[in-house]
Amino acid sequence: MESPGARERRRARPSRSHRPLLCTVLAVVAVAGATAGGTVYVRAGAHPGTAAVASPATSASREGVEPVVESATDYDAVLAAALGSVAVPDGAKVSVAVRDVGSAAGAVYGDAAFDTASIVKVDILAALLLRAQDAGRRLTAQEKTYATAMIEHSDNASASALWDAIGRAEGLDAANARFGLTATSGGEGALWGLTQTTAADQLTLLRQVFGDSGDEGCALSATSRAYLRQLMERIAVGQRWGISAAADGSAWALKNGWLPRSTTGRWDVNSIGRITAGGRTFLVAVLSNGAATQEDGIALVEAAARAAVTALAGAAGG
């Protein structure tokens, strides 16, 4: 459950109008619909070869000519249909956000908030790098040691040290306001793993880390992004699961999170990052909870990632 304090912090966040434009704003066609798996919000990027819907002014200026109107592809509906074929264990739920970097097509399935578990470690390091940028300094040798252990090996003690260094939830939330995240709230006290987030927000964070072409508006510098990406490309062997299941070969960069909840006995299992499949690059965030075992959660996340990437690649063409 999200705490009242976390909800209050999220309400106090700056509006989306303060997002860095080039790095976090999707060109979207907003359409809302409901599916059996939950509410779906369209975030369809501009698709090459798709005509824009004619405005009343445009129609009026073409006297005697019936305007030709074409609708942009509803990528969220495509994603929802694809995830409908994924077997979700009883008591579990999953949410996915995916973006084809080349075409800028993107989609989100589900808007529920999930515990981050260890995927928040990417956010913690991003916040630390942003603080260092603001101070005009590089990370210290000790900070780099913590960062490497935290990302590559998912070391919790290192994460706790850097969580304190950024000012815990207050520091994370302040950085996220600048990154453009609007539905993420830092965990209470020392509980960084209970930070709440959505798949859509994790996709926004990934765009900060990996960027698109013309990404000068990113809050993170090119040097900071390259450093974080490098660590995500060197994940320890035993943790190379999750969204990497949708990749061709080893062309991926990721961070996974897994957490057994003592209150339910069920597992939070999440995976975020960048993969390459079929010669295309995708940013993918898959969040889940309620699986009976870690293995069940991993299987769900991997199946969802494969379905999402395959569906978006087919819909976006190329």
Image: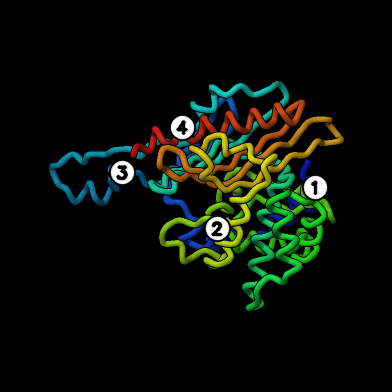
Q: Where is residue 13 in the image (x, y as percent from the top left)?
A: 66, 59
Q: Where is residue 193 in the image (x, y as percent from the top left)?
A: 77, 48
Q: Which of marks 3 and 1 is nearer the N terminus?
A: 1
Q: Which of marks 3 and 2 is nearer the N terminus?
A: 3
| On screen, residue 276 above or below 185 | above
Tag 4, which secondary structure? helix
**Residue bearing mark 2:** 208
State how far apart marks 2 and 4 are (Cα): 24 Å
Tag 1, which secondary structure? loop
* Amino acid type at image mark 4: Thr
**Residue bearing mark 1:** 3
Residues 202 and 251: in front is 251
State how far apart marks 4 and 3 are (Cα): 27 Å
Residue at image location 14% in from the left, 46% down from the top: 63
Which quadrant would residue 40 be assigned to in this image?
top right
Q: Which of marks 1 and 2 is nearer the N terminus?
A: 1
Residue at image location 53% in from the left, 54% down from the top: 207
Furthest toward the right, the residue is 262
Q: Earlier in the sequence, mark 2 or mark 4?
A: 2
The label on residue 53 is 3
* Horizontal side, residue 153 vs residue 86: left or right: right
Residue at image location 59% in from the left, 60% down from the top: 179
Q: Which of marks 4 and 1 is nearer the N terminus?
A: 1
CA neighbours of label 1 inside 10 A, class few (<14), some (14 to 19), many (20+):
few
Of marks 1 and 2, the one in the foreground: 2
* Amino acid type at image mark 1: Ser
State how far apart marks 4 and 1 are (Cα): 36 Å
Of marks 4 and 1, the one in the foreground: 4
